[in-house]
């Protein structure tokens, strides 16, 4: 517990050791960030095949790791609120202590995550020295969050780079377990959606706030134009985003299938996996679609695509950097949401239709080959 912390230049090359011990990876607290940390999980698995890897995550995020085809064990926990938060932290520390982990890799920047593994008496604790928590880490790295152009994936991978891990795949990949993928097919069948239909998934929300949410009336206008024979539109999203979906549905003549707030995380993953195309703001489900290699159109307002763009060569990102105040990273806007107003219905329709034309051409070509 009292081992001295070391800076980047003197970090031991843990990757060169034979790691036959238990390693704990503490996951971020949001779905999108959890997707972006998948290269760290996979990098640990490849670098230390002898190790016993465990991902620790909050309940909703744990669903993502549990749905994934992987040999990594998943532990879930509840954060606790108010006066219960400290009690939960102490309880979790004791629980982890019994597991006898030897190395902890901390992906969140919070003080509580560092305190948790310190309480668990994990002898080697690796993380960024943020929020005054450096004294709780044995291997502390300089905070890089303000580094220009640094993608969040590379921020996370920096933890492994500084441990001596090399040859990492930086693209998040989400292969769902067969039973999860089958759930998506079952849900679509129950909704009366045929297997030959083009499914357009839409996530009009974003957990961070209004500055990342394009306007419901503009989403509605796009969806009305996308409506056509052989196309079905699914609205997806989490609890609290139902009003956005209702506003969209009220504004259009051909309402989509509205599943916002009506699915579990695992079901949402399974449905995104069935999509032919995904349209969204910068959100967790945007990163899910990218990791599933779904063609997509991603809309950015206050956030920066250089930091959180979907890592998907089939993605079209729309972001008007000429708006002087973007990216501001604020959750509420003092400037009348100019960054989002700059995104027009025509350009979103144009980008989406171009992808759809490619997808529908591919589908027609495959059907023609089957008939020969």
Image (spheres, rainbow, N blue to C red):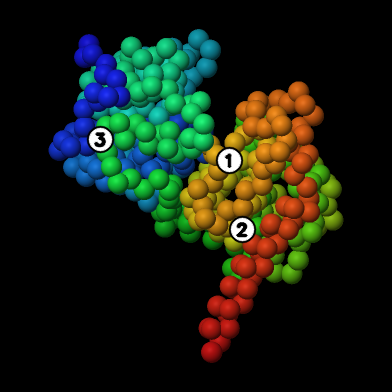
Element type at mark 1: helix
Pick whichever, 316 or 176, lies toward us.
316
Q: Residue at x 47, y 42 (%)?
A: 35
Residue 355 drawn at (x, y percent) = 64, 62
In the displayed structure, does residue 94 sit left or right of residue 317?
Answer: left
Instruction: Decide: is 251 above or below 2.
Output: below
Residue 172 drawn at (x, y percent) = 43, 47
Q: Nearer the viewer, mark 1 or mark 2?
A: 1
Q: Quadrant of residue 168?
A: top left
Q: Look at the image and tell me whether residue 236 can be seen.
A: no
Disc sitting over residue 164 in the figure: 3
In the displayed structure, does residue 175 sit left or right of residue 43?
Answer: right
Q: Residue at x 30, y 46 (%)?
A: 167
Q: CA distance from mark 1 to mark 2?
A: 19 Å
Q: Look at the image and tell me whether residue 159 can be seen.
A: yes
Pick whichever, 322 or 94, lies toward us.
322
Query: Where is mark 1, residue-wise?
Result: 305
Element type at mark 2: strand
Element type at mark 3: loop
Residue 309 drawn at (x, y percent) = 55, 43
Q: Residues within 10 Å of mark 2 (few under 14, many from 20)?
A: many
Query: Where is mark 2, residue-wise?
Result: 277
């Amino acid at each position: 517990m009292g081992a001295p912390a070391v800076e980047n230049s003197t970090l031991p090359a843990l990757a060169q050791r034979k790691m036959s011990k238990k390693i704990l990876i503490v996951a971020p607290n949001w779905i999108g960030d959890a997707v972006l940390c998948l290269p760290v999980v996979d990098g640990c698995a490849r670098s230390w095949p002898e190790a016993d890897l465990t991902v620790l995550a909050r309940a909703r995020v744990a669903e993502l790791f549990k749905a994934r085809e992987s040999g990594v064990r998943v532990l879930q926990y509840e954060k606790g609120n108010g006066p219960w938060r400290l009690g939960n932290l102490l309880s979790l520390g004791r629980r982890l202590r019994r597991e006898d982990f030897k190395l902890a890799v901390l992906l969140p920047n919070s003080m509580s995550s560092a305190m948790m593994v310190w309480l668990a008496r994990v002898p080697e604790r690796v993380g960024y020295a943020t929020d005054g928590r450096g004294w709780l880490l044995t291997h502390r790295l300089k905070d890089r969050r303000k580094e220009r152009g640094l993608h969040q994936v590379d921020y996370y991978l920096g933890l492994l780079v500084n441990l001596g891990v090399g040859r990492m795949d930086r693209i998040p990949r989400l292969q769902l377990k067969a039973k999860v993928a089958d759930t998506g097919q079952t849900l679509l069948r129950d909704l009366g959606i045929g297997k030959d239909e083009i499914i357009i998934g839409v996530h009009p929300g974003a957990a961070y706030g209004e500055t990342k949410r394009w306007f419901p009336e503009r989403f509605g206008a796009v969806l009305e134009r996308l409506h056509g024979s052989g196309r079905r539109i699914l609205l997806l999203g989490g609890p609290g985003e139902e009003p956005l979906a209702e506003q969209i549905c009220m504004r259009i003549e051909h309402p989509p299938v509205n599943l916002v707030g009506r699915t579990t995380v695992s079901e949402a993953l399974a449905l995104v996996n069935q999509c032919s195309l995904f349209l969204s703001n910068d959100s967790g489900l945007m990163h899910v679609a990218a990791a599933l290699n779904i063609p997509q159109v991603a809309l950015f307002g206050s956030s920066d695509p250089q930091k959180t763009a979907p890592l998907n060569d089939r993605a079209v990102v729309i972001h008007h950097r000429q708006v002087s105040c973007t990216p501001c990273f604020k959750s509420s806007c003092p400037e009348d949401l100019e960054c989002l107003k700059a995104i027009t219905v025509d350009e979103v329709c144009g980008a989406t239709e171009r992808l759809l034309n490619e997808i529908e051409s591919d589908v027609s070509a495959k059907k023609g080959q089957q008939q020969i």
